[in-house]
Amino acid sequence: MKYSESLKKNRDFQLVYREGTSYANKYLVMYVRENWLNKNRIGISVSKKVGNSVVRHHLARLIREGYRLQEEYFHIGYDVVMIARVNSKDCAYKEIERAIYHLGGLHQIVERKSQDENSIN
């Protein structure tokens, strides 16, 4: 991740939950808060309701990779927390990637992909 690092501290997550805005779709909930840094900080949360540890870690890796590959489209200077919903348990990578991009668009922190890139995906 070129422009990002991970959110790790509970107080950082709580600050994003308390002061950030949230949007949700079928697979993910995304909280966003401006951090005034020259980088994004990404936090991923997958509850035990979603599945066992294998399922949770697989889903966290899908979300992390989905963000990493679209990172260049996201504006810089935000704390982002992504929470996996139970419906995301059986999702393919492309569905997670689309869900991340969709939520970034709702938060207005993502630039539009060009037409050539949309036709490839």
Image (tube, grey):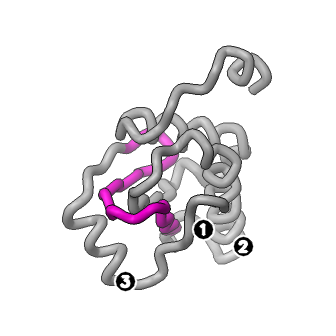
In this rendering, the answer to whether 73 lies above or below 7 is above
**What residue lies at 60% left-to-right and 36% top-to-bottom?**
98
Q: Amino acid at mark 2?
A: Val
10 Å crowding of disc 2: few (<14), some (14-19), many (20+): few
Which SS class for mark 2?
helix
The stretch drawn in magenta includes residue 36: yes
Image x and y of residue 42, in percent:
50, 64
Say the numbered circle drawn on residue 51. Answer: 1
Q: Residue 114 falls in which quadrant of the image?
A: top right
When asked about the image quadrant of residue 73, the answer is top right
**Left or right: 30, with 97 as reference point:** left
Decide: marks 2, 1 in contact (CB < 8 A)? Answer: yes
Q: Are marks 3 and 1 in contact (CB under 8 Å)?
A: no
Looking at marks 2 and 3 on the same chain, the residue that comes earlier in the sequence is marked by 3
Helix, strand, or loop for circle 3? helix
Part of the protein shown in magenta: 24-46
Considering every residue shown, the one lying at the far front of the view is 38
Foreground residue, 16 or 57?
16
Compared with 112, 39 (above or below) is: below
What amino acid is labelled 3 in the image?
Answer: Asn
Circle 3 or circle 1, nearest the eye: 3
Residue shown at 51% from the left, 44% from the top = 74
Q: Mark 3 sits on what residue? A: 10
